[in-house]
Amino acid sequence: MAVVAATALAAPLLLAASPHHGHSPHDPSKNAAELARKLVDRSSAKDAFRHLERFQAIADAADGHRAAGSPGHDASAAYVHRLLLKAGYRVDYQTFDFVYTETLAEKLSVVSPTPRDVGIKAMTYTPSTPEGGITAALVAVPADDTTGCEAADYASADFTGAIALIKRGGCSFAEKQAAASVAGAAGAVVYNNTEGVLSGTLGDVASGKIPTGGLTLAEGEKLVADLAEGEVKVAFEVRELQEDRTTRNVVAETRGGNAAKTVMLGAHLDSVSDGPGINDNASGSAGLLEVALELAKTHRSPTNKVRFAWWSAEENGLLGSEAYVAKLSEAQRGKTALYLNFDMIASPNGAQFVFDGDDSDGVGEGPGPEGSAQLEHDINAFLDREDKPHTGTDFNGRSDYGPFIEAGIPAGGTDTGAEGIKTAAQAETYGGTAGVAYDPCYHAACDDLDNVDMGHFDTNIDVIAHAVGTYAHDLGSLTRPVPAASDTGERRSGGLREGHAHGVTE
């Protein structure tokens, strides 16, 4: 991908001065250690908070959000672009088309036998019910390991004109609602198989067959219990605006450095349309921006080229990072030494999660591409030196590392948790409240400036700063064997592993 904008050529030639400042060009480890220390010392949550304030002001002036394809996102991207260009980076917009979505209605209520409202989240790319919704019988699909994934799952009852109640797991949400549609259902509600809200996507417009929403595990189990007592009738309304729009990533790179060894870091800049998205993900965007600006202030040219990206349309299914990776040639992919992702790094009830590059935790998905284990080890080792506990988290494809992993590029990064529920063990390790979501304002209007934990924010900005400083000069750790955790002092706290919830399709 070309990342040189014509306007960037007029920028001052920062990041192109002598890279070594007294160190031998053949001593990358010393250059890396010096730059890493400098960036960690100079990059702070206090300074990055000014970017959060700017993103909040942008949302306040733009219908309360910064969703891709909206004026709020356009203004956010322009803010990032302007600061990076002024700092001396080569900066470009990468424009792509996508389907903009905005929830218009998401309502579910039991009409009989005992009326009550049920919390529901419309799934991205869902078809819409008529305005005012539909009233129909609720029919549960028998639960097993692949509930609602196959036609045979619907043979035990008549789903014609009904709302299908389906437990999460075994296949994608798109597959579940498609199978329910074939069985004659008028709509589908999928309830979670773990604690927390279920905010999902059907993947794309073409996959949507019937109106579909997500429920919590507790709400789903309560409805199942109601059905065990007899017939349940519900009123169901899910409506979503879907419109072809254009949006753009912001990509910036240092003017100096070996392009054959490009170090890449990214964060998504867009919010959902329900709120300003300050933790999700102005936090990662602001942290990345602050470190990039501090790197520019050193006036040093890195040994390796450093590239930063602020993705758009992540909330629609990782579309910005997918568009970027899809445009890379095979040679360009080979020149990308690593990708680090930072998404929701300041959750108010958060924990410190580090992506499990080698699957050493033995949970969920397998390891990342070769080099991912080393990225995890390097982050953990830094946190250990800072006396910060950390917990492994799975590569489940729910944030912008996904397209890079699929392309075989080593990946890693951190987050502090989304809709998952903090365990008692995690509360003991990290503080906060057990039994409450890591971010109670996840995908909600209250994800504002008050929804930020400055301690987590500062820790993860230090992680970003240390990684930039280290890999800008030295990639040697990516080819060294990773010692066992017991040999390095790496600490993993107990409790539930967390997966970030963006782009989740199953």
Image (spheres, rainbow, N blue to C red):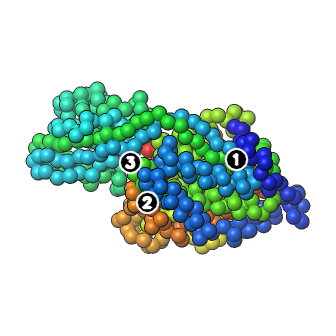
Residue type beneath disc 1? Val
Give the mark nearer the N terminus: 1 vs 2: 1
Q: Residue beneath label 3, please?
A: 199
* Label located before the other in sequence (3 or 1): 1
Would you place residue 495 above or below residue 98 in this image? below
Q: Mark 1 points at which residue?
A: 91
The residue that appears at 55% across and 40% down in the rendered structure is 247
Residue at label 2? 447
The C terminus is located in which quarter? top left
Residue 183 sits in which quadrant?
top left
User: Callout 3: few (<14), some (14-19), or many (20+) C-alpha neighbours within 10 Å?
Assistant: many
Q: Sequence-wise, which precedes: disc 2 or disc 3?
A: 3
Disc 3 to disc 1: CB gap under 8 Å:
no
Q: Residue at x 58, y 56 (%)?
A: 285
Residue 256 visible? The answer is: yes
Measure how far apart labels 1 and 2 are at the Cα level. Answer: 29 Å
Rendering coords of residue 242 (x, y %): 40, 36
3D distance between C-alphas at marks 2 and 3: 15 Å
Please say if the residues under marks 1 and 2 sit with CB atoms less than 8 Å apart.
no
Image height of 325 relative to 475, above or below: above
Indicate which disc residue 5 carries: none
Percent across and percent down for residue 500 are: 47, 52
Quarter that holds the N terminus: top right
Depth check, mark 3 against mark 1: the one in front is 1
Task: Please tell me which residue is depicted at 89% across the width and 65% down the height of the picture.
Answer: 22
